[in-house]
């Protein structure tokens, strides 16, 4: 959008809260000028300046996106499009309708952003008449989808993100133009989501998880025992890697690696001997203070006397600030243990309520359900049986920490360690950073989402997706889609046999070689009618009567020529297109998941051979996915499915 010679004007605006917009559904009557409208929405601080969309030339009033004026647009008055008012009225009604029916603010924010992005693109690409009629909207939508396709091909945009943008816009345009028949997108080449493009949460290796849990257990158990038993400072804290002395100060302990850089600390805390677990001697710390010999000695004596007083005070007061501060550290350590054990997501954990009116029931073998009523609402969560004693121990620590009652099960504190507050959204990262930076403990950062993936990975390995979904309080589809990547080490071991099987691919285009095999719909077979399994864990067993069975057979071969590659890519395309025929997402993943992975790895292996072969594979993949140029066998199958209206 060129700004040269553009006269920017600040127009008159009117602000309404989304819930209070005076909607009038008579198309000929407008309760106010929609070109002036700014909406105060519950999901963000800044207003949504929908009225500015009536102008094809607009820009934020302030360049800094954090500034309050960024939400208000300056406009070029001459670019006003009166015909857009009706469409913007429709958008406001859409927003109000979806919000009143319970759609989450986060989702509505995404829809609004997608539509705004679409209009910005239209006004910058000769599509200013986009909101004139349903047909002009359809034309602009088609052009925008082509742009999204280009962005995905050039790896500037994930295909699932592009599909989301597209689907948001289609839904909004259908509402605006009252398009119940789907005219707006009928016949257009639509971007379809790819399950393979979904970024699943990486699973932390079991060694990292074990290291973290051991540390959290050590911190929680020993510090809680120290605080609740009113033990005396200094005390020894035994961690998995080393033993630390703990003192009543703002830096209660320090590892050997941290002590090596003690001279670089902002405050040296020289009165505390972290290595020997006692108060330092005056003569040993004089060198750390400035001045002449007398001044250094006086400063050292003063510091030592102050530390002795603090030590005496803390050891006489069970509720001293430094005891509470240490108890807060133990509380955070337990929160991490709770996340690792329950796999609860952080958003849910932050708002988890608590009441002393709770019961413990058996939910599943080895698991216990903790049920309670809090705030007139029933809720429950599941922990392992062995975790229950730790949880009850935490409740005692929680009672010690709370000065006043709280409805929250977990909480943070302000600097006084008196007033509690909700946990921050960055709790897991912040806590691990605190252990590293303040104490010097080398601990890997595992986020709540990664703990969830770790728990899912363990449960799926030991049980099944249904049990995993029950334990995580999630759907089977979500579990399979987001939490089944496996850790790098475990995945490497699991895939070693698979990579060995790739050596059976024949990177040869000679007809003599091909004549030694039997042609099959997805390539070639070395010993037809004599199937031999590669992976016994695969749900699809070798079967010479079904093309899918070839991929788990040791006799499967593929010649690196156009014919065989197109066969394989066509099979993959048909498999994904037929996804809707599966009885459930779980059924599809169980049957086709490993097959699709195997196909992708074969194609990747082919690409890696040489540049010529890479270009051939890329061209065939593009022709199959974009132009549906399938191999003859799979083309007939595809047409049959379409004719039977089994796929669209």
Image (cartoon, grey):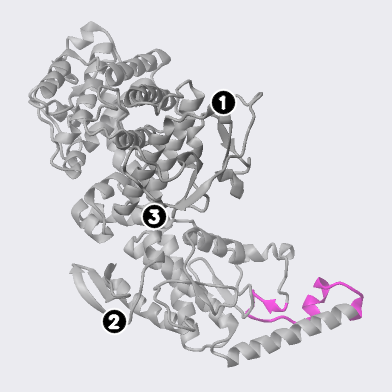
Q: Where is residue 55 in the image (x, y as percent from the top left)?
A: 51, 32
Pointer 3 residue: 19
Q: Give the range drawn in magenta.
A: 271-294
User: Which element is circle 2 on?
Assistant: loop
**Mark 1 secondary-structure assignment:** loop
Mark 2 vs mark 3, foreground winner is 3
Classify residue 264 by image quadrant. Answer: bottom right
Q: Where is residue 446 in the image (x, y as percent from the top left)?
A: 44, 56
Name the residue tied to disc 1: 1
- Could you tell which of marks 2 and 3 lies nearer the N-terminus? 3
Q: What residue lies at 28% left-to-right and 16% top-to-bottom?
A: 627
User: Residue 306 appears in which quarter of the rendering?
Assistant: bottom right
Nearest the eye: 191 or 609: 191
Residue 190 placed where, x, y %?
30, 26
233 on left or right of 142:
right
Residue placed most toward the observer, 398 or 55: 55
Residue identified by numbered label 2: 357
Q: Which residue is drawn at 20% across and 35% down?
A: 592
Residue 379 position (above or below residue 634): below
Characterize the local packing of mark 2: few (<14), some (14-19) or many (20 or more) Cα atoms within 10 angstroms: few
Asked whether, in this view, residue 503 is left or right of residue 398, the answer is left
Q: Is mark 3 on a helix, strand or loop?
A: helix
């Amino acid at each position: 959008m060129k700004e040269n010679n553009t006269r920017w004007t600040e127009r008159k605006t009117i602000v309404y809260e989304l819930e209070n917009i005076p909607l009038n559904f008579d198309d000929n009557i407008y309760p106010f000028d929609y070109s002036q409208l700014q909406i105060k929405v519950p999901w963000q601080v800044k207003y949504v300046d929908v009225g500015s969309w009536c102008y094809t030339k607009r820009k934020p009033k302030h360049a800094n996106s954090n500034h309050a004026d960024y939400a208000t647009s300056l406009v070029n008055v001459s670019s006003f499009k009166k015909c857009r008012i009706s469409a913007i009225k429709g958008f406001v009604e859409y927003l109000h309708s979806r919000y009143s029916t319970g759609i989450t603010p986060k989702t509505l924010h995404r829809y609004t952003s997608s539509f705004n992005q679409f209009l910005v693109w239209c006004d910058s690409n000769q599509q200013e008449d986009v909101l004139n009629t349903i047909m002009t909207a359809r034309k602009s939508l088609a052009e925008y989808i082509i742009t999204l396709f280009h962005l995905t091909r050039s790896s500037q945009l994930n295909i699932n993100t592009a599909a989301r943008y597209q689907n948001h816009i289609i839904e909004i345009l259908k509402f605006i133009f009252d398009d119940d028949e789907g005219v707006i997108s009928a016949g257009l080449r639509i971007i379809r989501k790819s399950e393979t493009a979904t970024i699943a949460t990486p699973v932390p290796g079991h060694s990292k998880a074990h290291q973290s849990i051991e540390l959290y257990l050590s911190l929680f158990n020993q510090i809680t025992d120290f605080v609740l038993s009113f033990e005396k400072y200094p005390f020894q804290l035994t961690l998995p890697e080393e033993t630390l002395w703990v003192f009543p100060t703002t830096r209660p302990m320090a590892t050997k690696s941290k002590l090596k850089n003690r001279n670089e600390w902002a405050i040296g805390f020289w009165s505390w001997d972290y290595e020997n677990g006692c108060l330092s001697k005056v003569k040993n710390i004089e060198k750390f203070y400035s001045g002449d010999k007398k001044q250094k000695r006086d400063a050292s004596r003063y510091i030592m006397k102050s530390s002795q007083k603090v030590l005496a005070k803390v050891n006489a007061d069970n509720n001293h600030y430094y005891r509470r501060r240490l108890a807060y550290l133990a509380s955070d350590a337990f929160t991490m243990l709770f996340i690792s054990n329950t796999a609860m997501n952080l958003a849910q954990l932050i708002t988890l309520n608590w009441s002393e009116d709770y019961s413990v029931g058996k939910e599943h073998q080895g698991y216990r359900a903790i049920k309670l009523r809090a705030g007139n609402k029933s809720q429950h969560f599941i922990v392992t049986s062995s975790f229950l004693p730790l949880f009850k121990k935490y409740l005692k620590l929680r009672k010690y920490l709370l000065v006043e009652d709280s409805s929250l099960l977990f909480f943070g504190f302000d600097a006084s360690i008196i007033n509690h507050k909700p946990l921050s959204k960055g709790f897991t990262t912040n806590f691990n950073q605190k252990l590293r930076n303040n104490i010097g403990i080398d601990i890997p950062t595992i986020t709540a989402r990664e703990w969830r993936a770790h728990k899912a990975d363990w449960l799926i390995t030991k049980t099944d997706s249904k049990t995993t979904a029950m334990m995580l309080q999630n759907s089977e589809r979500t579990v399979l889609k987001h939490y089944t990547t496996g850790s790098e080490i475990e995945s490497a071991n699991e895939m070693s046999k698979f990579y060995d099987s790739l050596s059976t691919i024949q990177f040869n285009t000679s007809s003599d070689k091909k004549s030694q095999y039997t042609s099959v719909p997805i390539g070639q077979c070395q010993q037809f009618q004599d199937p031999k399994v590669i992976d016994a864990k695969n749900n699809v067993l070798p079967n010479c009567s079904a093309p899918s069975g070839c991929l788990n057979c040791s006799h499967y071969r593929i010649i690196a020529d156009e014919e065989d590659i197109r066969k394989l890519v066509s099979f993959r395309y048909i498999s994904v297109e037929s996804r809707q025929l599966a009885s459930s997402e779980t059924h599809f993943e169980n049957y086709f998941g490993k097959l699709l992975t195997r196909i992708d790895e074969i194609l990747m292996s082919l690409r890696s051979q040489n540049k010529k072969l890479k270009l051939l594979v890329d061209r065939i993949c593009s022709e199959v996915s974009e132009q549906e140029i399938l191999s003859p066998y799979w083309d007939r199958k595809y047409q049959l499915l379409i004719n039977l209206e089994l796929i669209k």
